Amino acid sequence: MSSCRDALLAWALLGAAAAAAGGEPYPGIGRSATASELAAWDRDVRPDFKGLPAGRGSVAEGQVLWEARCAACHGVFGESNEWTQPLSGGTDAEDIRRGRAARLADPAYPQRSSLMKLATLSTLWDAIARSMPWDAPGTLSADETYAVTAYLLHLEGIVDAAFVLDRASAAAVQQRLPNRHGMQFEHALWPGGLPGSTRRPDTRGDTCRRSCPPPQRVVGFPPGHARDAHGELAEQNRLVGAQRGAPTSGAAR
């Protein structure tokens, strides 16, 4: 009983100390984040557009920004420039109507663009807001992010040249994405929470755990006259790791 009373007293003293320190949970160690600091990090945008900030951006404004800050890497029309994956291309009006990008199932099609695979508009907006441009990620304003997103949507034929993207129009754009029905939920990343989801994992391990057969070790050597035909292999392989070469200057073992 006394130990329980002592524990309760200790918790009470800790609570009093925290109150005396202005409510800080760990007095003398850092400080609580301010509301503005939390807001700076709380930038995620959900598929239902919760978290999407106020703002607007037109296709025309996005084209100006794109050519100034994006085209060097992604190409003027999102076709990529040397080393990045194409962002646009590969869909048509029928894909927009159906919500599935048909060429994703065509093995003969040379390359999949980002907008061919995009299932949620929030993913595109969030990626641009967080990680673009390459040399200054996260520096685009909300209006600039809306504008660049609108321009990309126009490149794919999803919106027309006069379109203005904002929070009010985002849901309508979502219903025109060429692969909006392409997201799969039949795996354990969404356990029991969405239609078609499952609690079963999407991989199945087959490692033996009990009553296992003894492991087999297969070793092969070339015939003696050929072992050092190309010099000492042990000296030609790296000295660390599993791929260390076997000595070949002696007789076959």
Image (cartoon, rainbow, N blue to C red):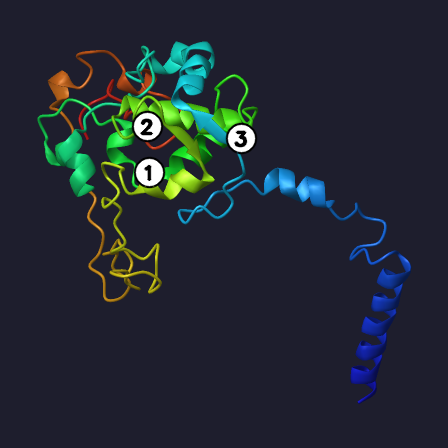
Please identify the quadrant where the C terminus is shown. Answer: top left
Q: Position of residue 32 (x, y in %)?
A: 76, 49
Please rate how many residues cluster around mark 2, counting C-alpha atoms within 10 Å: few if below 14, some from 14 to 19, many from 20: many
Residue at left offset 80%, top offset 77%: 7
Q: Mark 3 is on which residue type?
A: Ala
Q: Which mark is residue 173?
A: 1
Q: Is residue 238 above or below residue 213?
A: above
Q: Do the CB atoms of the residues marked 1 and 2 lie less than 8 Å apart?
A: yes
Q: Determine the CA span between mark 3 and mark 1.
A: 17 Å
Q: Mark 1 is on which residue type?
A: Val
Q: Determine the CA span between mark 2 and mark 3.
A: 16 Å
Of residues 157 and 227, the one nearer the viewer is 157
Q: Position of residue 132 (x, y in %)?
A: 48, 24
Q: Which mark is residue 142?
A: 3
Residue at left offset 20%, top offset 59%: 213
Q: Quadrant of residue 78?
A: top left
- Side of 74 relative to 39 (left or right): left
Of residues 152 and 160, the one nearer the viewer is 160
